[in-house]
Image: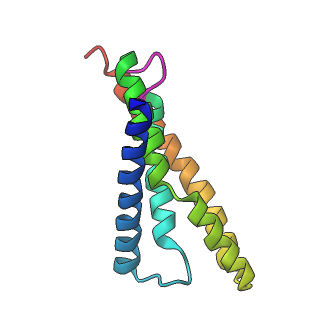
Amino acid sequence: MLTYLWIALGGALGSVARYALGGLVSARLDAGETFPLGTLVVNVAGSFIIGVLGALTIPEGRLGSETRAFVTQFLMIGICGGFTTFSSFSLQTLNLLRDREWLYAGGNVLLSVVLCLVAVWLGYLLGATLNSAKGS
């Protein structure tokens, strides 16, 4: 039962962080409603964070089994699950397509997929580097 509580708490915190960061990016960069830049930034950041955590939580990683379980439940499933916004991404892309904004829709899909894959890879590399410092 405690597992579900950690996931729920993490999800709530991740959702609030998503709302705050998405709003901040939209307000600062004034992309308006034309291109969902706030969602893109959140997805890239979330992908990077989950990449770092993914590397740290592998069995041969830096974290012990109890810590690994907590990080997986609270941070990865909870916070990252609430923070990343692929459901919002999908709806915004659909709306761009419905509005016949083909270039923006394609750009959103391409940038989101490529940048998030690069971010998760870079995050994983950072986590692997932290793992290699395990003995230090």
For residue 22, above or below residue 14: below
Q: Quadrant of residue 65?
A: top left
For residue 135, above or below residue 8: above
- Taking the view exactly as shown, the residue that stands out farthest to the front is 1
Q: Residue at x 43, y 40 (%)?
A: 7
Q: Residue at x 42, y 20 (%)?
A: 61
Looking at the image, which is closer to me, 131 or 88?
88
Q: Which residues are magenta?
A: 56-63
Q: How is the image coloured?
A: rainbow
Which quarter of the rendering shows the C terminus?
A: top left
Q: Locate residue 21 relative to residue 77 in the image: left or right.
A: left
Which quarter of the rendering shows the N terminus?
A: top left
Q: Locate residue 107 relative to residue 73 in the image: left or right.
A: right
Q: Residue at x 45, y 47 (%)?
A: 80
Q: Position of residue 73 (x, y in %)?
A: 44, 34
In this orientation, does residue 120 appear? Answer: yes
SS majority, magenta:
loop
For residue 59, above or below residue 75: above
Q: Position of residue 51 (x, y in %)?
A: 48, 39
Q: Position of residue 99 (x, y in %)?
A: 71, 85
In this orientation, does residue 125 appear? Answer: no
Asked whether residue 62 is drawn in magenta, I would say: yes
Looking at the image, which is closer to me, 104 or 94?
94
Q: Position of residue 33 (x, y in %)?
A: 52, 83
Asked whether residue 7 is drawn in magenta, I would say: no
